Amino acid sequence: MISQNCNICPRNCNVDRSTEKGFCGMSNDIKVAKAYLHKWEEPCISGTRGSGTVFFTGCNLKCVFCQNYKISQKNFGINVLPEKLADIFMNLEKSGAHNINLVSPTIFIPKIKESIIIARNKGLNIPIVYNSNAYENIESLKTLDGLIDIYLPDLKYYSNETALKYSRAPYYFKYATKAILEMYRQVGNPVFDNEGIMKKGMIIRHLILPGKLNETKEILKWISDNLPKEIYVSLMGQYIPYFEAYKYPEINKKNKQKRIRRGNRIFL
């Protein structure tokens, strides 16, 4: 079960989630918004049949531009027991999924761990993908060592000011980079099957924000300085100002193609 003093993530809310809620707004129960075969992840994740994606409700960030805000901020979803979540995993595998893709799993780590073990004992035989915002407590991540095959962290911000302004995430870069190093320790360099589908490893995502190309530059420099060249980076330019981005004029616009090309040049 989730600890009576929840410190799963860097928020360290220290609340008993059976009776009260912390920053994420979630109780002790796993809450799932949707589960389906997702065909629009990175090609080595979605493949030809799709990634068995499970979207969890709630989030430990408050991103003002979140495209999934109805799930992350509006608590859309249903409560499920670990056994039921394991059945969802099994059904996705039967449907042809290349992997099980856990989206925003951080706040439910202890119970998701139970579900993975149950599903493996039932014969689940496809990789588990941990798809997160990287605002993680490494002690929580360590409890998943040996259970996660692929880490898919989104390294969002470099400066504390930007992280606070757009996601209310103090010291985001410090926590996220420590988490990514722990993720790499667990899974190592990428391994692919004969269809080009990733079986093990890590892909670091980064979404280029309007007017924040300097952050992109610093993030890519950190990756280059701290991780092997074999690590995959997914540099995303498809920013759209969802949710409350309209309150922030500097990011209330799409990226220009010129900015995306500059980001790619920095990376190369």
Image (cartoon, rainbow, N blue to C red):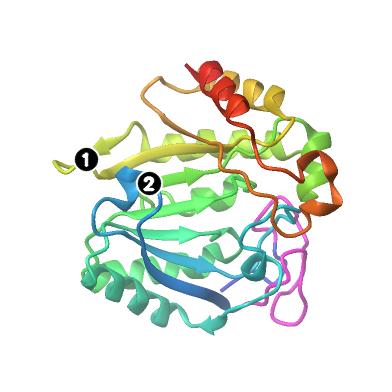
| Along the viewing direction, whichever of 225 and 208 lies nearer the viewer | 208
**Looking at the image, is 74 positioned above or below residue 7?**
below
Give how far across and how far down residue 93 sits, in percent: 25, 68
Count of numbered circles in the view: 2
Whether residue 169 can be seen here: no
Q: Say which quarter of the image contains residue 196.
A: top left
Q: Residue 129 in magenta?
A: no
Q: CA distance from mark 2 to mark 1?
A: 14 Å
Residue 196: give its label: 1
In the displayed structure image, the side of residue 174 where residue 230 appears, left or right: left
**Looking at the image, is 72 positioned above or below residue 251?**
below
**Circle 2 — which element?**
strand
* For marks 2 and 1 on the same chain, the one whose residue lies earlier in the sequence: 2
Q: Residue 16 in magenta?
A: yes
**Circle 1 — which element?**
loop
| Along the viewing direction, whichever of 121 and 169 lies nearer the viewer | 169
**Looking at the image, is 113 positioned above or below residue 21?**
above
Three-letter code for the amino acid on which mark 1 is drawn: Gly
Magenta span of residues: 7-28
Give how far across and how far down residue 52 sits, in percent: 35, 64
Q: Which residue position is annotated with label 2?
A: 150
| Along the viewing direction, whichever of 103 and 209 lies nearer the viewer | 209
Whether residue 228 can be seen here: yes
Q: Residue at x 56, y 17 (%)?
A: 266
